[in-house]
Image: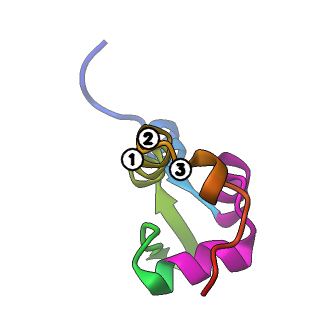
Amino acid sequence: MSGTKTAADLAADLQDIEVVMIRTSLSRASIYRRMAQGKFPKQRKLGARTVWAKSDIDRFCAEVIGDGSMGDCMGQDLAA
């Protein structure tokens, strides 16, 4: 198979808020709060949709797991 991505591949690389919430175990409010604090990847506007790049969310999850703070931040709000 060639290195060319199909439309389905490109769509899978973009994740909406519902998918991001499931993947990170964070609430919608926690995601937007962390974005405002610079602690979460920024979303991207794609027409009427707001999406996150899968690679950005993958990197966020890897950083959280890698620094041992999974219990401290996944699914729990941090003090503002």
Q: Which residue is mark 1?
A: 59
Looking at the picture, does residue 43 appear above or below residue 1? below
Horizontal side of 34 relative to 60 (left or right) equals right
Q: Is residue 22 above or below residue 43?
A: above
Q: Given the image, on which type of amino acid does mark 1 rest? A: Arg
- CA separation in Å, label 2 and label 1: 5 Å
What range is drawn magenta here? 17-34
Is 26 one of the magenta-colored residues?
yes
Task: Give the number of the disc on residue 62.
Answer: 2
Relative side of 40 to 75, left or right? left
The one of 4 and 73 positioned closer to us in this rendering: 73
Residue at figure coordinates x 50%, y 54% from the top left: 14
Dot 3 corresponds to which residue? 69
Quadrant for the N terminus in the image: top left
User: For residue 64: magenta?
Assistant: no
Element at label 2 = helix
- Tell which tag, 1 or 3, sits nearer the viewer: 3
Q: Are marks 2 and 1 in contact (CB under 8 Å)?
A: yes
Q: Main secondary structure of the magenta part?
A: helix
Q: Nearer the viewer, residue 52 or 70?
A: 70
Give the spatial CA distance, label 1 vs label 3. 14 Å
- Marks counted in the figure total 3
Q: Give the percent coordinates (x, y) of residue 34.
A: 53, 76
Tell me which numbered mark, 3 or 2, is placed earlier along the sequence. 2
Mark 1 residue crowding within 10 angstroms, few (<14) / some (14–19) / many (20+): few
